[in-house]
Image: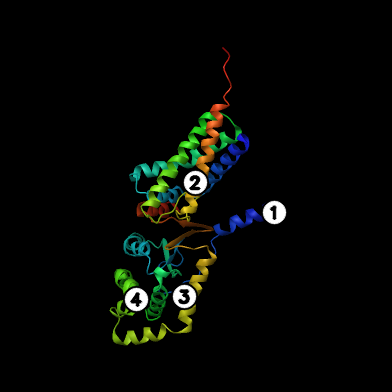
Amino acid sequence: MLIALRVVLGAIFIYAAWLKLRDPWQLFAMSIDAYRILPLTAVEWTARVIPWAELAVGLLLITGLWLRVSSSLVSLLLLTFFVLMVRAYAKGMAIDCGCFGPGEAISWKTLLRDGTLLAAALLVTTMAFLNRPKTAA
Amino acid sequence: MKLCALLLAALIPCLGQPMAADKDKVFGNPSAATRLDVFSDFSCPTCRSFHMEILPQLERDYGSSGKLYIVTHEFPLNIPAHKYSREAAYDATAAARIGKYEAVADRLFLNQGVWTASGKVWDAVATVLTPAEQKKVQALAKDPSVLSEVESDVSLGSSLQVNSTPTVFLTHGMRRFAVPNPMNYTFLRSLIDDLK
């Protein structure tokens, strides 16, 4: 179960990264800027870094390397995305989610999807910590 | 085989297929390397922002460079809150036939709050037309070719999976990108300038 969950999550993160990396960074920057939380310089930096971070944690999740670190990072990323999306939705902001490239507005469906991914990531993180190998006394 | 079909299906939207354009709803150089196709609804507040804030900046920065071609397509959303959008699209397209699209579009967006509440679309349109032009536009707004042009725009948008407005596609060579909403002009300009 842990293996299946982390492989699916990893694949989703790699897919999300690929969709952003194949397009010019400015498109993702516009999606981030639409949330109105960061200054422009931070938006540019975030737009350039996040897709690579998604790709890295996706690969780590699939390979199972540094699983406690990678699953914690994925949970943290998804928690951040989820909180920002809920905030935008609650404020009635008609903006793109930015999750899988442009063209997908924030809706209850995107919230449900990201909430499910967050729950899965938290489960993987919990299981990764519970299954850690015991060190010899 | 199935994988090949899936890959092909994923690639097709990236290919810059030509889109038809009304000659009075365009701006810039038709042979420009970069093209923006804007699917817009006169009742939509974000379209208003695009028309009143982003478009003038694009015209100012790229008007003389010949680097950009902007095409507007009507995409009146079929939702109760936008029940007068189609009428506005017909009037604006009729006005385009006498070279008055820009004036009518400007006025419709400027007075958006008024006519979307009252339903008196024509009152907004008429203010920028002479009595003679009003007669022509009123007749043209019922002309089958005008109605068909609007419906062609809607069909084109639907075929491109447009389901909200404004939806803006940026085409450069064989690549086509959907631009997120709302647009930030700093990043949009940086994007256009980076496309060489």
**Position in image of residue A21 (x %, y %):** 51, 46
Label 2 crowding class (10 Å Cα cut-off): few <14, some 14-19, many 20+?
Answer: some
Q: Residue at x 49, y 51 (%)?
A: A110
Residue pointed to by mark 3: B150
Three-letter residue code for mark 4: Gly
Same chain for labels 4 and 2? Say yes or no.
no
Three-letter residue code for mark 1: Lys
Instruction: Tell me the CA gap for discs 2 and 1.
Output: 29 Å
Occupied quadrant, residue A38: top left
Q: What element carries label 2?
A: helix
Three-letter residue code for mark 3: Val
Three-letter residue code for mark 2: Asp
Q: Residue at x 41, y 74 (%)?
A: B89
Sequence-wise, the earlier of marks 4 and 3 is 4
Q: Is mark 4 on a helix, strand or loop?
A: loop
Sequence-wise, the earlier of marks 3 and 1 is 1
Kindly report which numbered mark, 2 or 1, lies closer to the viewer in this rendering. 2
Kindly report which numbered mark, 2 or 3, lies closer to the viewer in this rendering. 2
**Position in image of residue A70 (x %, y %):** 52, 32
Return the chain for callout 3: B
Residue pointed to by mark 4: B119
Return the chain for callout 2: A
Q: Is residue A91 or residue B87 the one in the foreground? A: A91
User: Which of the labelled discs sits on residue A114, or is there none?
Assistant: 2
- From this view, report whether residue B77 is shown above or below residue B97: above
Return the chain for callout 4: B
Instruction: Tell me the CA gap for discs 4 and 2.
Output: 40 Å
Same chain for labels 2 and 1? Say yes or no.
no
Instruction: Tell me the CA gap for discs 3 and 1.
Output: 37 Å
Q: Residue at x 45, y 47 (%)?
A: A25
Sequence-wise, the earlier of marks 1 and 4 is 1
Q: Is residue B6 left or right of residue B190?
A: right
